[in-house]
Amino acid sequence: MKKFDPANAIQDLHQFGEFGDVNPSVTDSATYTFLEARTMTDTFQGETEGCYLYSRHWNPSNKYLADALAAMENTEAAWVTASGMSAITCTILQICNSGDHIVSSMTTYGGTFAFFENYLKKFNIAVTFVNISNLDSVKKAMRPNTKLIYTETMTNPLLQISNLPELAKIAHANNAKLVCDNTFTPLMVTPHNFGVDVVVYSMTKFVNGKNDCVAGAICSTTDFINSLADVNCGTAMLLGPVLDPKLSSSILKNLHTLHIRMMQHGKNALYLAERFKELGIKFNYPGLPEHPDHELLKSMMNNGYGFGGMIAIDMGTAEKANAIMEKMQDADVGYLAVSLGYFKTLFSNSGKSTSSEVPEEIQREMGMSEGLIRFSVGLDMNIERTFDKIKDCIYKIKN
């Protein structure tokens, strides 16, 4: 069987504007007219194809982007949202009701952790956090009322790799869904091909790649996407995290360069990891054989896109990490900033920033050092020059 290639799936899209534009037209209308009243009624009831009602429900520009994302993820359909967190929260609240239970990776984005640990309590939805690499722990955490297992393909910020095929087996054996955040690994891994039911994204990151907007996506079956958009009980429809169609148009253009960007991010990160290894710096990168999940990642990867642009180094203490990051910014290595997937390198101390919602005792339990610096490696043309700057910054602090 021919191996799925997500970049080819995007390349093969036949999308152009109503006047033959090579870029699909941007539709900035909030509402849409109908030639017949009956068609409006049918559209409200979800019984028409190709008709648009109101842009909180669907918008042609958003549909173009959603179709491209579904092609990339090899799913039947997709939905775009105003942020990655809205993609996550809408998905969870669509699947779960009061009294339900979730099994989640302990190592996950701080905002997701806070939503699970703090916010879902008001809906009487319980969450059990586990080491997602310990499949026995996952199995033991399952309950009769467990509705989903939640994980990230490559976890934030410890860069664990989730065993998606085995997690899918556990979920489906318990009549639960597997939901996976693929933000760190677009094109690299296609989670749906390994049994994942719903794939979520923060498109703010690698997918868009320019840090000029906030956006999210949900990729799944047509039935699930339609349930999100249902005018009576659809979480996305009723909570209303609609993405601006102008942003959809911009993201769609950027999606067509994602394969080039991911290859360069991965090439640069791999180079830094190899040099960090030579220097004896404590680091974490799934692209080297020393990483415990290296072979697992290779078994799920699509060919040609590298091992990702995320790498972490451990400076031992937050004070030392902060000093090194400040020096790196002064040396033009990149920016001391949260987020990732940008064309310049971004670095932050995860425990004090993007994972600060996770209590310190749980940070320690998951193995997160207070001196962990998470790098989102940029598209630097001369990565050797960048490494020399990083090395100088580290030596200045150590000495």
Image: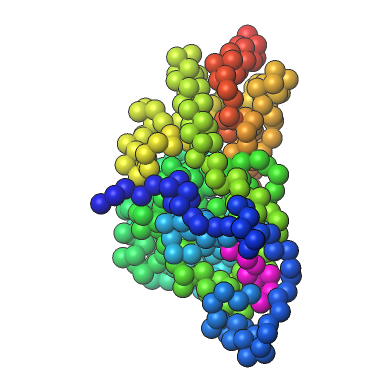
Q: Tell me which colouring the rendered structure shows.
A: rainbow
Check the picture and name the quadrant holding the C terminus: top right
Our reading of the magenta stretch's main secondary structure is: loop
Which is nearer the eye, 334 or 75? Answer: 75
On the question of residue 54 being in view, the answer is yes
- In the displayed structure image, the side of residue 136 where residue 333 appears, left or right: right
Q: Does the magenta stretch include residue 189?
A: no
> What is the x, y in percent for residue 236?
61, 69
Q: Is residue 61 magenta?
A: yes
Name the outermost residue toward the bottom: 38
> What is the x, y in percent for residue 223?
46, 73
- In the displayed structure image, the side of residue 159 where residue 137 appears, left or right: left
Which is nearer the eye, 256 or 134? Answer: 256
- In the displayed structure image, the side of residue 132 where residue 24 appears, left or right: right
> What is the x, y in percent for residue 374?
58, 33
- For the point 69% across and 30% down, the residue is 336
Region of the chain picked out in magenta, as a range: 53-63
- For the point 55% across and 57% down, the residue is 15
Q: Within the image, what quadrant is residue 297 found in?
A: top left
